[in-house]
Image (cartoon, helix red, strand yellow):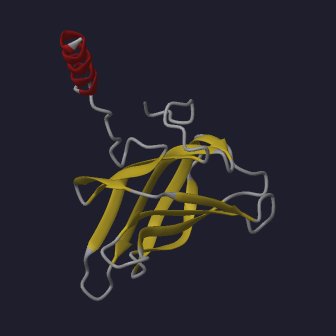
Amino acid sequence: MKKFGRFCFLLVVLFSCGQEVESLGPCETSRWASATRNGEAICLVSPVISYWNANTDNASIGFTAGMTDRVGVTEIEASFSIPVAGVTLDTAYPLISGKIASADEFTEGFISFITFDYPNCMAGTFELKSINSVAGITQTYTNGKFVFNLEGNVDTGCNPFK
């Protein structure tokens, strides 16, 4: 009986020492954004996409992503103009307004969608630029990509970048 008990203990140890469950990095989840900010690759957590006044003259997309050291302050807050006809895939929609870290205004930029099934699944690209008028410092976000899957599933067709 002691041998059987040791055998069972050994099996439990072997199974518990198997592969560890891998945790997902911030740009591997079902909701992420990434970009090159001033030449440095970054991952922006917690993107949110809002579609306001759809199919009207005032239609716009709101895009927020990333967090700063200040509590509750997102790194990117921007809105983009959408035509009355709605969103067309692979079309660059121009920046209306926005700020970086609730401070410097974005001066130019666009957002484009590869996938658009609002509010369930959206993915696409973006670029933004801001200039601090006092210090003359430019912040640029190039090669921006984002994925937002409302259901929270990682392995779905919502992520065209996989």
The number of discs equals 0
Q: Residue at x 24, y 17 (%)?
A: 5
Judged from this view, the residue extending furthest toward the front is 1
Is 75 in front, or is 17? 17
Judged from this view, the residue extending furthest toward the bottom is 134
Quarter of the rendering occupied by the C terminus: top left
Residue 109: percent from the left, percent from the top? Answer: 47, 61
Residue 60: percent from the left, percent from the top? Answer: 67, 64
Q: Residue at x 55, y 31 (%)?
A: 156
Quarter of the rendering occupied by the N terminus: top left
Is 103 in front, or is 91? 103
Q: Residue at x 30, y 75 (%)?
A: 69
Q: Is residue 19 above or below residue 69?
A: above
To which quarter of the image does residue 128 belong? Answer: bottom left
In this rendering, would 47 be left or right of 26? right
In this rendering, would 120 be left or right of 75? right
In this rendering, would 149 be left or right of 40? right
Residue 28: percent from the left, percent from the top? Answer: 38, 41
To which quarter of the image does residue 161 belong? Answer: top left
Q: Residue at x 56, y 36 (%)?
A: 158
Residue 132: percent from the left, percent from the top? Answer: 32, 81
